[in-house]
Image (cartoon, rainbow, N blue to C red):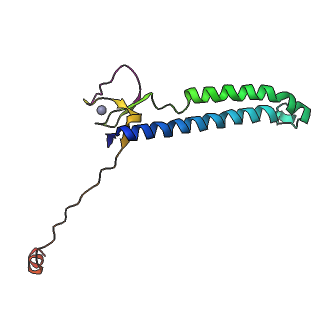
């Protein structure tokens, strides 16, 4: 079931999520820059062709600009969780809109401020008070 995080847990979760977004943006930017600098199509049957060292050097400024742009776009739009809401009552998850009331009667909350908590099943087992009591039951 979904439960509200404590303020300390919210700060930790937001820091962790921000770190993941930054690492993803850096990875995507570097990947775009490397692909732009080292890969070139137009070979036989549209296969990548080998490119010369001078061509790689001439592509570096463009690949840096492209890497920065892809990194910014990735950071801005990928892995954003502040747009997601969850209803703690029924568990419905949706993107943020103007409707905060769930059809189940619950109220949608920001998913960053919630966490999933497994409910522990407690099985009550009645032990017999004595052996003679256990024999009576069998
Ligand atoms: Zn609901």
- Highlighted range, magenta: 94-104
User: Residue, x 65% and y 38% (percent of image)?
Assistant: 27
Asked if residue 52 shows in the view, the reply is no
The quarter holding residue 84 reads: top left
- Can residue 56 be seen at all in this image of the molecule? yes
Q: Residue furthest top?
A: 98
Main SS category, magenta section:
loop
Q: Is residue 5 above or below residue 124?
A: above
Q: Quadrant of ligand 1?
A: top left
Q: Is 18 within the magenta? A: no
Image point (70%, 35%), residue name: 30
Task: Name the quarter where the C terminus is drawn.
Answer: bottom left
124 left or right, relative to 43: left
Q: Nearer the viewer, residue 81 or 136?
A: 81
Residue 75 at x, y percent in the picture:
58, 29
Question: Quadrant location of residue 94?
Answer: top left
Q: Residue 53's x, y, as percent?
A: 90, 36
Residue 98 versus residue 70 in the image, above or below:
above
In percent of the image, x 24 and y 58: which residue is there? Answer: 122
Residue 105, percent across and down? 24, 29
Could you say where residue 37 lies in the image, as x and y percent from the top left? 80, 33
In the depicted structure, whether residue 67 falls above or below residue 1: above
- Is 96 magenta? The answer is yes
Question: In this image, 130 relative to 38: left or right?
Answer: left
Q: Nearer the viewer, residue 135 or 2?
A: 2
Residue in the image at 72% along x and 26% along y: 66
Residue 78, picture quadrant: top right
Q: Please determine whether, in this image, residue 93 is positioned above or below residue 101.
A: below
């Amino acid at each position: 079931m979904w439960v509200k995080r404590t303020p300390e847990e919210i700060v930790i979760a937001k820091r962790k999520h921000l770190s993941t977004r930054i690492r993803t943006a850096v990875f995507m930017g570097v990947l775009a820059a490397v692909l732009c600098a080292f890969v070139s199509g137009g070979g036989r049957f549209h296969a990548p062709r080998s490119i010369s060292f001078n061509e790689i050097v001439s592509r570096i400024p463009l690949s840096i600009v492209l890497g920065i742009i892809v990194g910014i776009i990735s950071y801005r739009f990928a892995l954003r969780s502040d747009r997601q809401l969850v209803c703690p009552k029924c568990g419905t998850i949706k993107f943020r809109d103007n409707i905060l009331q769930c059809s189940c009667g619950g109220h949608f909350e920001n998913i960053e401020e919630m966490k999933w908590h497994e409910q522990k099943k407690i099985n009550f087992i009645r032990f017999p008070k004595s052996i003679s009591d256990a024999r009576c039951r069998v």
